[in-house]
Amino acid sequence: MLIADIARTSADVAATSGRKAKVASLAECLRAAEPGEAAIVVAYLSGELPQRQIGVGYAALRDVPPPAPEPSLTVLAVDAAFTGIGAVSGAGSVARRRELVAALFGRATRPEQDFLIRLLAGELRQGALDGVMAEAIAAAAEVPSAEVRRAVMLRGSLGPVATAALADGVAGLRGFALEVGRPIKPMLAASAPDVDEAFGKLKAEAAVEWKLDGIRAQIHVSGGEVRVFTRTLDEITSRLPEVVAAVRELPVRDAVFDGELIALRPDGSPHPFQITSARTATRTATDAGPGGRGKGKGTVPLAVFLFDVLHLDGHDLLDAPGAERNAALAEVVPEGLRMPRVVTADPARAKEVFDEAVARGHEGVVVKSLDTPYTAGRRGAGWVKVKPRHTLDLVVLAVEWGHGRRQGLLSNLHLGARDPETGGFVMLGKTFKGLTDELLAWQTAKLRELAVREDDWTVHVRPELVVEIAFDGVQRSPRYPGGIALRFARVLRYRPDKSAAEADTIDTVRAVAPVMD
Ligand SMILES: Nc1ncnc2c1ncn2[C@@H]1O[C@H](COP(=O)(O)OP(=O)(O)OP(=O)(O)O)[C@@H](O)[C@H]1O
């Protein structure tokens, strides 16, 4: 298959608005792929692979050589070139990578070059197409899409699932099982404005658990060895010896737990979120999130609150109802390590739990169905979160240079919500409010790393950084592409633990706040 075929499909998918048409176009491309190409095709169309493999700065993409007259580049040739570029290391590697990128681009036609630039610049990597892509794999392989979704949740990525589905159909997909030691996508919660409505979404009796504002952790115990993964499936075991020690004490050989880690004060109230997130800070200072490094902040021990179990000593529990999973959890985990929880059919009692959680400084509650299975990676109706105030997790699309006291700093953020239909982002407003000096310095460094182009005062960035925004409402606004804009948006904090694919959608924005004229 030629990279031109993928470029064309990508352009078609971007240009069509209907989900069905997108699925059809992706499925057609997949059907045409050779067995060895399917995983690459899926990865490139959803913008996944090269970013991780390579690390080419945007500068390397600016001086593109003249295009080739005819398409001849194959998918496999491009993938081999990417692998080669990714393997360059040591002194002079930046220049060498640029040479290799230029050589690759010299073999591409203009539309192919455009596609490769968008791929390498991360403009295709929004993960927002994941659902559409799963359907396309199902259509191309002629298998039920639920089978594909389940395999994706268990494997954590689309490429290998596509290969298996196209080669061996349902039998191939059934080969994906929960594997202790390999993280799966965590279950997510839907939202409700209050406890009554959350109860309305579930059956009469439900569990009401505190919602702690910590770090999601999937903890795997394999033959007694403990490993900890984040919600983005990154391993953080070595940073959390106290968590490993606590879980090692449990009477299990093999298990997969789901839970929340949080830094608490001696009176049980939570430290600010930054104190918790500093403990799981990753690679560089900017990756770690604001305040993620230095000042001795990353030393407060984290407490463990487990709330689910997906596997226990040889038994998979993913498909077991919530109540059964919780009973299994209670058998092996002492109360002190479990999330506080009350099972009730009485919304008034649930409200008491909510009030108590909030009074103790926690975020709210998660109301959980007693009979739904663990639906990883989807905002299922099995869990419904309720918080006293609504905030949005939006993606920074661009940022303007500041004036006056903020001269030299990137200040006014352009905020976007995900549009699951198009796989893109819809801009909802701008804000420079709520930014402390520390946040300004951090975002200036981080957004410069993500910059893709600059015009006048505005720096356009790869849509990767997620920021939590408070706002007073949503109003109609013809100036904005979605026809609505946020009122009095202000920054609460950055969410380095979330990817852009997990940001709130335009539908969520409409659901949590009525649109005012
Ligand atoms: N008792 C609990 N059960 C499930 N999740 C919990 C609980 N307490 C805290 N959490 C956290 O809440 C999150 C569930 O909400 P959701 O799936 O919407 O993720 P989120 O978008 O990160 O939520 P938020 O931004 O509101 O924290 C989980 O990822 C987890 O980190």
Image (cartoon, grey):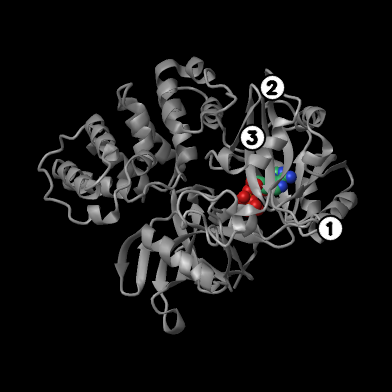
Q: Is mark 1 within 8 Å of ligand 1?
A: no
Q: Are marks 1 and 2 in contact (CB under 8 Å)?
A: no
Q: Which element type, helix, strand or loop, lies under badge 2? A: loop
| Residue 517 visible to an observer of this rendering | yes
User: In front: mark 1 or mark 2?
Assistant: 2
User: Mark 2 or mark 1, which is nearer the start of the sequence?
Assistant: 2
Q: Residue at x 37, y 29 (%)?
A: 39
Task: Residue at the far bottom: name it.
Answer: 404
Which badge, 1 or 3, comes first in the chain's sequence?
A: 3
Residue underneath mark 3? 219
- Residue 381 in sight in this render: no
Residue 33, given in percent of the width and then of the height, sits at 31, 26
Q: Nearer the viewer, residue 478 or 398?
A: 398
Ligand 1 neighbours mark 3 (CB distance < 8 Å): no
User: Residue drawn 64% across and 34% down?
Assistant: 219
Viewer-nearest residue: 352 or 23: 352
Q: Which label belongs to residue 286?
A: none
In three-dimensional space, the C-alpha distance between marks 2 and 3, rounded to whole angstroms, equals 13 Å
Q: Amino acid at mark 1?
A: Asp
